Image (cartoon, rainbow, N blue to C red):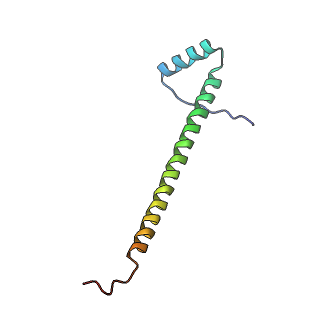
Amino acid sequence: MKSVTTSIRINAGLALRLARAASRMARGKNWIITQALEEYLARVNQEGLAAEARRQSLIVARRERRHRDDRFWQGDTAGWR
């Protein structure tokens, strides 16, 4: 995939930690930032999918509960007082 250049602003402490990690791992800062973004975005996507699954599950549960209640109350109530 074609790469593009972007810039970010980070505080001096984070920049120092990034430089030290890159040196310790013998990797470029770009590689570390890219890996971190990939992992973060994958996690955010999973959380979004999980939230949508919960939302749909609640919708189905409400429908089933409503449908079940409707069936319970269908019947001959003419003799009730």
Residue 77: image quadrant is bottom left
The quadrant of the rendering that contains the N terminus is top right
In-front residue for pair 28/71: 71
Q: Is residue 27 left or right of residue 69?
A: right
Look at the image and tell me in which quarter the C terminus lies: bottom left
Front-most of residues 57 and 35: 57
In the image, what residue occupies the spot 65% across and 20% down?
28
Residue 24: image location, x then y, percent = 60, 12
| Residue 80 in which image quadrant | bottom left
Side of 43 where 77 appears, left or right: left
Q: Position of residue 66 (x, y in %)?
A: 42, 68
Residue shown at the point (52%, 16%) measured from the top left? 16
Residue 9, horizontal then vertical, whole percent: 53, 29
Disc tally is 0
Q: Position of residue 13 (x, y in %)?
A: 47, 19
User: Of all residues shown, which one is farthest toward the front?
Assistant: 79
Q: Does residue 81 lie above or below 9 as drawn?
A: below
> 31 and 79: which one is in front?
79
Q: Is residue 15 above or below residue 41?
A: above
Q: Residue furthest bottom?
A: 78
Q: Is residue 15 above or below residue 2?
A: above
State the residue in front, 47 or 8.
47
Q: Residue furthest left?
A: 81
Question: Residue at horizontal 55%, vertical 38%?
Answer: 43
- Outermost residue, right direction? 1
